[in-house]
Image (tube, rainbow, N blue to C red):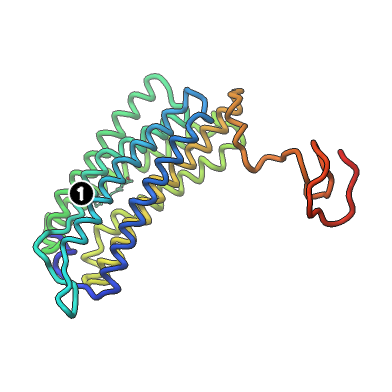
């Protein structure tokens, strides 16, 4: 039994949750296009990060789409509220999805931070084993979220221990390899650390929601929390890792990596009013400067 199935919902609560769940899978579909289309601008050695982001997008899309459909079919309008309709809604689908996504997200970090050789394989094993241990102990605990008896707290704590271990490993991978990145990418790598820390903390927050806010509004808050966490930890994270990989590719002389830099200075009209490259261009304000 899940927390979600213990309440009935008013129109606002019910639709808000439908919308939030639909945002989740729509973002994953959009992310899939982005990661596939931009993969050629990353040097082949780091391109696996785009492929892995695409893998995460596909698995999350199906999981969130399924969850949305479960939500729709789990409740029916009885004239005053949305009440149980016979199908159970379950966040357990999220946990099984994480068994794909958590190891894959962590391996992406190794690819982009340039961890190699034995260190790569050791970190790989620790990430996969630690990640799965965190998820499956939490999975057992969430079956007790309605009664909130001892197993809910004990498995939650065991899971938290693995979570702490993973955070230490992530910090070591990021800060221990910062010096190997080009100067231009170090700020982004530090941002990845804060992104992981904050967005991953939202998941235990959602686990605790039945204990913190035991009501239909708590369910709304929980599904919003999950969706924000999913978008940040899968999509924004993948975009940032792609940016780092592209900067490393530029530094290593991979030509196509610089070609799609939309913020780079270009030919044509400039802010100073000068024209480089070609003449003309309508709508220019101020005196025309000499071509530079
Ligand atoms: C659980 C159980 C309660 C204790 C803790 C948990 C941590 C979960 C985390 C999940 C991260 C998921 C990600 C998914 C991305 O696709 C299992 C809720 C600490 C950190 C990053």
Outermost residue toward the left in this view? 86
Identity of the residue drawn at 54% across and 28% down: 180
Residue 149 location, quadrant: bottom left
Residue holding disc 1: 93
Mark 1: secondary structure: helix
Q: Is residue 244 above or below residue 29?
A: above
Q: Is residue 192 above or below residue 20?
A: above
Left/right placement of residue 197 relative to residue 147 reads right
Outermost residue toward the top in this view? 117
Q: What x and y, as percent, mark residue 39?
A: 47, 32
In the picture, the quarter occupied by the N terminus is bottom left
Q: What x and y, as percent, mark residue 137?
A: 18, 46
Left/right placement of residue 230 relative to residue 63 reads right
Identity of the residue drawn at 14% across and 68% down: 6
Outermost residue toward the bottom in this view? 80
Left/right placement of residue 266 relative to residue 247 reads right
Q: What x and y, as percent, mark residue 141?
A: 16, 52
Taking depth in this image into account, of 46 and 73 the one nearest to the observer is: 73
Identity of the residue drawn at 87% across and 40% down: 291
Taking depth in this image into account, of 43 and 34 the one nearest to the observer is: 34
């Amino acid at each position: 039994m899940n927390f979600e199935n213990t309440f009935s919902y008013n129109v606002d609560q019910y639709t808000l949750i439908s919308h939030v769940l639909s945002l989740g899978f729509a973002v994953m579909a959009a992310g899939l296009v982005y990661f596939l289309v931009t993969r050629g601008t990353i040097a082949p050695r780091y391109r696996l990060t785009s492929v892995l982001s695409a893998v995460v997008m596909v698995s999350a899309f199906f999981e969130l789409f399924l969850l949305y459909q479960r939500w729709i079919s789990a409740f029916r309008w009885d004239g005053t509220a949305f009440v149980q309709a016979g199908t159970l809604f379950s966040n357990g689908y999220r946990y099984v999805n994480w068994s794909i996504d958590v190891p894959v997200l962590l391996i992406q970090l190794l690819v982009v931070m340039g961890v190699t050789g034995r260190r790569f394989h050791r970190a790989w094993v620790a990430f996969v084993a630690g990640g799965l241990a965190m998820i499956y102990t939490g999975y057992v605990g969430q079956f007790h979220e309605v009664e909130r008896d001892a197993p809910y707290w004990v498995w939650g704590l065991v899971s938290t221990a693995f979570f702490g271990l993973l955070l230490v490993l992530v910090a070591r991978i990021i800060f221990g390899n910062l010096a190997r990145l080009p100067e231009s990418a170090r700020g982004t790598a530090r941002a990845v650390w804060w992104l992981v820390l904050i967005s991953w903390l939202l998941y235990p927050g959602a686990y605790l929601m039945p204990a913190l806010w035991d009501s239909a509004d708590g369910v709304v808050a929980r599904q919003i929390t999950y969706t924000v966490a999913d978008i940040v930890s899968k999509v924004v994270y993948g975009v940032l890792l792609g940016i780092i990989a592209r900067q490393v590719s530029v530094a290593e002389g991979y030509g196509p990596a610089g070609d799609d830099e939309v913020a780079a200075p270009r030919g044509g009209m400039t802010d100073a009013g000068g024209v480089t490259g070609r003449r003309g261009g309508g709508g220019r304000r101020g005196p025309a400067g000499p071509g530079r």
